[in-house]
Image (cartoon, grey):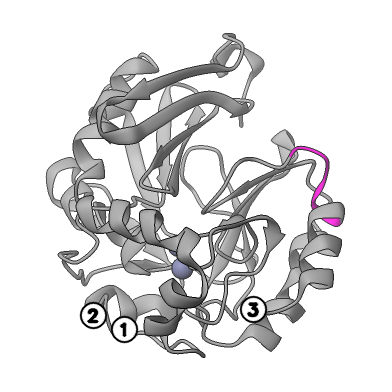
Amino acid sequence: MTSASTILPAPMHRAVRPGGATLTRNVAPGVHRLEHAYVNCYLIEDAGELTLVDTAFPATWSLLLQAIQQIGRTPSDVRAVVLTHAHFDHLGAARRAGEEWGVPIWAHPNEEYIARHPYRYEHESPRILYPVKHPASIPVLTAMAKAGALSVKGLANLQFFEADDVLAVPGRPTVIFCPGHTYGHSALHLADRSTLLCGDALVTFDPYTGRSGPQIVSGAATADSAQALESLDALAETEARIVLPGHGTPWKTGIRGAVAEARQRGRS
Ligand SMILES: [Zn+2]
Ligand SMILES: [Zn+2]
């Protein structure tokens, strides 16, 4: 359970870190966003303990340590890492977190193969064409490469969750299974904070096109767009007010509006 006293009282606070990373505190009550190279990680605070959701890139590691210090915590407060999915841009620092912090790395079983082999994943469209068609993606992909996107190490020994599980980790998120972007993609719902961490099931920025606004990720990185669009229903049913995507800025006017926009935009 989260008591009000455990949630940082500070208003939203932004601090730009070296390397182009930004820490924004309390994007939702007691949830802090670290954006690095156009990818979001989130620290969920609960009674002085932390859950890290997604880990961006290998170079994100030192920024995570700084972020934890900046919110007044230490790495020993981290109890778990939870992955929305195992794409290289969310898996990057996970193995190191598991090794150095000795914490479990949670994910859906359908993510196991990608976690072991971070560069072998299904996607509908050839990625090579996207920078040509969408030049706005070039600085994004360059920043990702600089952050170590091409040298992510795989990991085994995931801790598995299933749809609708309530995880016994700080924040006690409920697993909202929403496959399509990957076959095990899962969002995390913090019902008591009316907050949904939705990974790449719904983003407000697509790294492969450089376009902003609620949408599913383009076919450059999505396994099954039709399934991803269907899975938006599961997100909408949470009725969460605050939506925290894997890429892009928070959306604070309710998941239903975000889902409606994403549906209207469709696949790209
Ligand atoms: Zn992804
Ligand atoms: Zn991603």
Whole-angstrom CA distance, mark 1 to mark 3, is 25 Å
170 horizontally vs 145: left or right: right
- Of 85 and 48, which appears nearest the observer? 85
Question: For mark 3, what is the residue?
Answer: 268
Q: Amino acid at mark 1?
A: Tyr
The residue under label 3 is which amino acid type?
A: Ser
Calculate the distance from the C-alpha at mark 1 to the C-alpha at mark 2. 6 Å
Q: Reading the chain from its start, which is encountered first: label 3 or label 2?
A: 2
Question: SS of the residue at dot 2?
Answer: loop
- Distance between the alpha carbons at the discs numbered 3 and 2: 26 Å
Q: Disc number at residue 49?
A: none
Q: Looking at the image, which is closer to me, 201 or 155?
A: 201
- Residue 203: image x %, image y %? 61, 58
Asked whether residue 6 appears in the rendered view, the answer is yes
Residue 84 in sight: no
In the picture of the structure, the residue carrying the numbered disc 2 is 117
Residue at (43% x, 89% y) in the render: 126
Point out the stretch of residues depicted in magenta. 252-256
Please tell me whether mark 3 sits on a helix, a strand or a loop.
loop
**Quarter of the image holding residue 79?**
top left
Q: Residues within 10 Å of mark 2 (few under 14, many from 20)?
A: some
The residue wearing badge 1 is 113
Circle count: 3
Three-letter amino acid code of the residue under disc 2: His
